[in-house]
Image: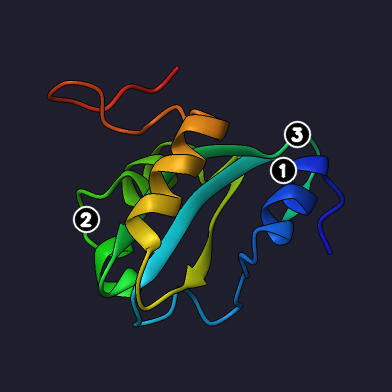
Amino acid sequence: MIKDPLFDAIKDYGFEISEFGPPEESGIYMVLYGEAYLGFLTGPLMIAYIGSSKNIKKRVLNPNHPYRVLYNLKHKTHLVFTASKVMKEGYRELEWKLISEFMPDMNKVGKGYILR
């Protein structure tokens, strides 16, 4: 179990983390990361990206997706994972609300991704 205030906040929105990976359904997902040692979180949890898709699993596993980019850069020193909320409709509005609230580092700005 992850002990972090940000983790508690996203759980309050109804996001779930599955050991089987993201669902093959529509909804919103977050790419999360934090410093880790031997698979245990040792630093604060951060949201790198928030997105939505008709098939979350298919989107996240795309090799050019921010999740894959971040995983390839940081997987040796950080935990990198996704949290998702399955929704049939209204997920675009909630996506924009969450982006405005959490301001993730890798959400698209202009024509490219930024990583602060």
Q: For mark 3, does the 10 Å Cα neighbourhood hold few (<14), some (14 to 19), or many (20 or more) residues?
A: some
Query: Three-letter amino acid code at disc 3?
Result: Pro
On the image, the x and y values in percent for residue 60 come to 32, 61
Q: Are marks 2 and 3 in contact (CB under 8 Å)?
A: no
Query: Three-letter amino acid code at disc 2?
Result: Pro
24 or 63, nearer to the observer: 24
Location of residue 83 by image quarter:
bottom right
Disc nearer the start of the sequence (2/3): 3
Disc nearer the start of the sequence (1/2): 1
Q: Residue at x 51, y 46 (%)?
A: 75
Q: Which mark is residue 26?
A: none
> Which SS class for mark 3?
loop
76 or 107, nearer to the observer: 107
Location of residue 49 by image quarter:
top left
85 displayed left or right of 13: left
Q: Residue furthest top?
A: 116
Instruction: Please tell me whether mark 2 or mark 3 is closer to you in this view.
Output: 3
Q: Residue at x 51, y 66 (%)?
A: 84
Q: Which mark is residue 63?
A: 2
Q: Which mark is residue 44?
A: 3
Q: Residue at x 47, y 31 (%)?
A: 100
